Image (cartoon, rainbow, N blue to C red):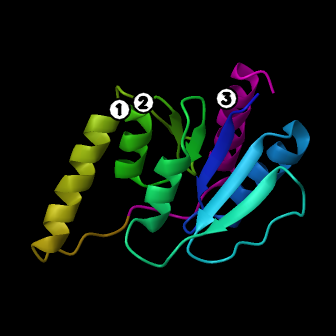
Amino acid sequence: MSSKILVDADACPNLVKKILFRASIRTKIKLILIANQPIKYPNVDSIKNLVVEKVFDAADNKILELLDKDDLVITSDIPLAADVLKNGASALNFRGEVFTDDNIKSRLNMRDFMETMRSSGMQIKSNNPSISQNELMTFANKLDTFLTKLGY
C-alpha cells in the first residue's frame, strides 16, 4: 500500500494532529506534515515533517507536488482541496467534512464571495469557533473510513 496522508499542518489543530499520529502509528500509513515551521511529532518511521519556505502557497504547492491518486489531504484550504480533487485524490477538513466534486464548487463560490466582501471593507465576523468534540469524532470516523477503504 503506497497511499499516504498529506497534512496542511500550519493551520491544523493539535487535537487533529494527535488523531492523525495515532492512526499512522496504528496502521503504518505514511503521514507527512507540510508546514513552514518544524512540527513536533512522534519519532516513528511512518511520520515526517517537511518544512517549506515561508512564502505564499509554498505548503500547498509541496502537497500538490507529492500528491498521488489514492492519497488523502487534510486541509481547511478550499482552493487546495479543489486542486486535490482535480488530481483524483481525497480531501478532508479538520472538522471531518469531506470535500467532494459535488460540494467543492459551492464552497469555492462562498469563499470567493466572503473574500470580495472583506476586500470591499465589510467587517465579516468569523463563524469558525474552536473545534468541538463532535467534530473531532466526525474527523476520526471519516479518517477511519478512508483507511478502511484502502485496506489499512
Question: Where's residue 147, x and y in %?
Answer: 73, 30
Q: Are marks 2 and 1 in contact (CB under 8 Å)?
A: yes
Q: Depth check: 60 or 66 in front?
A: 66
Dot 3 amino acid type: Phe
Q: Which residue shows up at 47% across the image and 79% down it?
A: 54
What secondary structure is found at the residue carrying circle 1?
loop
Dot 2 amino acid type: Thr
Alpha-carbon span between mark 2 and mark 1:
5 Å
Q: Which residue shows up at 70% across the image and 64% down it?
A: 49
Alpha-carbon span between mark 3 and mark 1:
18 Å
**In this rendering, would 105 be left or right of 48?**
left
Instruction: Judge whether residue 133 is colored magenta.
Output: yes
Q: Which residue shows up at 90% across the image and 57% down it?
A: 44
Reply above or below: 4 against 55.
Answer: above
Frontmost of labels 3 and 1 is 3
Dot 1 amino acid type: Asn
- Density class for disc 1 (Cα within 10 Å; few <14, some 14-19, many ≥20) is few
What secondary structure is found at the residue carrying circle 3?
helix
Query: Which residue matches tag 1?
Result: 103
- Density class for disc 3 (Cα within 10 Å; few <14, some 14-19, many ≥20) is some
Query: Which residue matches tag 2?
Result: 100
Q: Earlier in the sequence, mark 3 or mark 2?
A: 2
Q: Depth check: 111 or 69 in front?
A: 69
Q: Which mark is residue 52?
A: none
State the quadrant of the C terminus.
top right
Instruction: Judge whether residue 93 is colored magenta.
Output: no
Residue 12: quadrant of the picture: bottom right
**In this rendering, would 102 be left or right of 13?**
left
Residue 101: quadrant of the picture: top left
Query: Which residue matches tag 3?
Result: 146
Q: Residues in magenta?
A: 127-152
Is residue 18 visible in the rendered structure shown here?
A: no
